[in-house]
Image (cartoon, rainbow, N blue to C red):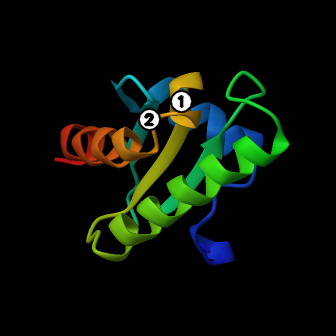
């Protein structure tokens, strides 16, 4: 679970990150990353009904949250991250981790 300070909450923060951030797409997800002047790292998730029913969406969110929490812990500079799951994320759980790792490398590096 991400602490409250590490979560994007307002729609303005989501909008700013998606519109101004660097976008990296993979078959199972799209990652939007924007740098912040302070050292606070925050993350938000978008998992639409196209991914599946409520159980499936929550499972995908839990997996993504776990991956993001591990990456944010080692992050030294401040970033806002929005992770948007695509429908393929529901069925490709092993590929999801690989796609996230490569997207993170491309977006944050």
Q: Residues within 10 Å of mark 2 (few under 14, many from 20)?
A: many
Residue drawn at 68 percent across, 74 percent down: 4
Image-based side of 65 in relation to 57, left or right = left
Image-based side of 24 in relation to 87, left or right = left
Q: Which residue is mark 2?
A: 32
Residue drawn at 78 percent across, 27 percent down: 49
Q: Quadrant of residue 43?
A: bottom right
Q: Residue 98 appears at what percent x and percent y?
A: 28, 44
Q: Which residue appears farthest toward the right when viewing the image?
A: 54
* Residues tagged 1 and 2 counted as in contact (Cβ below 8 A): yes
Front-most of residues 45 and 16: 45
Q: Residues within 10 Å of mark 1 (few under 14, many from 20)?
A: many
Q: Residue 16 appears at what percent x and percent y?
A: 57, 34
Q: Which mark is residue 54?
A: none
Q: Which residue is mark 1?
A: 18
Q: Residue 21 appears at what percent x and percent y?
A: 42, 33
Front-most of residues 82 and 61: 61
Residue 107 against residue 35 in the figure, above or below: above
**Disc 1 and disc 2: Cα gap in Å?**
6 Å
The number of callouts visible is 2
Image-based side of 24 in relation to 46, left or right = left
Residue drawn at 28 percent across, 38 percent down: 103
Q: Residue 62 appears at what percent x and percent y?
A: 62, 59
Residue drawn at 72 percent across, 42 percent down: 57
Q: Which residue appears farthest toward the left when viewing the image?
A: 109
Residue 96 against residue 74 in the figure, above or below: above
Figure quadrant of the N terminus: bottom right
Is residue 67 in sight in this rendering?
Answer: yes
Is residue 39 in sight in this rendering?
Answer: no
């Amino acid at each position: 679970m991400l602490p409250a300070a590490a979560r994007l909450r307002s729609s303005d923060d989501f909008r700013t990150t998606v519109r101004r951030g660097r976008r990296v797409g993979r078959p199972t997800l799209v990652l939007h990353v924007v740098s912040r002047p302070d050292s606070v790292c925050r993350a938000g998730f978008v998992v639409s009904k196209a991914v599946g029913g409520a159980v499936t969406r929550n499972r995908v969110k839990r997996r993504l949250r776990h991956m993001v929490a591990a990456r944010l812990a080692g992050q030294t500079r401040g970033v806002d991250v929005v992770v948007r799951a695509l429908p393929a994320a529901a069925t490709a759980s092993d590929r999801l981790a690989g796609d996230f790792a490569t997207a993170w490398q491309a977006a944050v590096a």
